[in-house]
Amino acid sequence: MGMASVVDLSELVNAPQAKPIEVVPMGDGNAAQGNGCPARLTWTNVMSRFILYCFSNLVREGLKTYKVFKEVNLNQVAKDLFEFAHVEVTGTQVNNHLRKWCAKWVKICRLRELSGALWNEGLFIIWLDDEHYNGNVKVRL
């Protein structure tokens, strides 16, 4: 068995320094169809942490959900984000971003449950042997 590989999860837990919010114009897009193409929103770590904090507070206060949050809750979090970061987002954008984080969490839980995985709570990393790492982690070059 070779040297164990590490999956670093610290970026999901630790709050890095705030970065400026970037909105990238996408051109005319569907303007010919009359609906125009909105600017693409780039979520910063601060914005992500804020909406996750808002949703965790909703659940802590007793909000009952079954896999999804209601539209009124999504719109409230979007409004709170606007007040916090002065970035206008829709409830749909908040929902899509929350779905992205849910998908990441599912991957983390799946990796933690592997028989050869070791979880380091202090460093927020999962140690995997080479076989599990190569079979479960996609390397981006």
Image: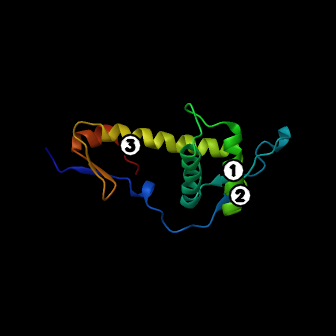
Q: Amino acid at mark 1?
A: Ala
Q: Position of residue 62 (x, y in %)?
A: 57, 41
Q: Is residue 10 left or right of residue 77?
A: left
- The colour mode here is rainbow
Q: Are marks 3 and 1 in contact (CB under 8 Å)?
A: no
* Callout 3: SS: helix
Name the residue: 48% across, 65% down: 16
Q: Is residue 30 left or right of residue 120?
A: right
Q: Position of residue 120 (x, y in %)?
A: 28, 53
- In the rendered image, which quarter is residue 135 located in? top left
* Callout 2: SS: helix
Between the C-alphas of marks 3 and 2, the distance is 30 Å
Q: Which residue is mark 2?
A: 82
Q: Are marks 3 and 2 in contact (CB under 8 Å)?
A: no
Q: Is residue 71 above or below residue 20?
A: above
Of the residues under marks 3 and 1, which one precedes in the sequence? Answer: 1
Q: Are marks 2 and 1 in contact (CB under 8 Å)?
A: yes
Q: Which residue is mark 3?
A: 108
- In the rendered image, which quarter is residue 43 located in? bottom right
Q: Amino acid at mark 2?
A: Phe
Name the residue: 66% across, 49% down: 77
Of the residues under marks 3 and 2, which one precedes in the sequence? Answer: 2
Between the C-alphas of marks 3 and 1, the distance is 26 Å
Between the C-alphas of marks 2 and 1, the distance is 6 Å
Name the residue: 68% across, 58% down: 23
Q: Which residue is mark 1?
A: 78
Comparing 134 with 89, the one in front is 89
Comparing 29 with 86, the one in front is 86
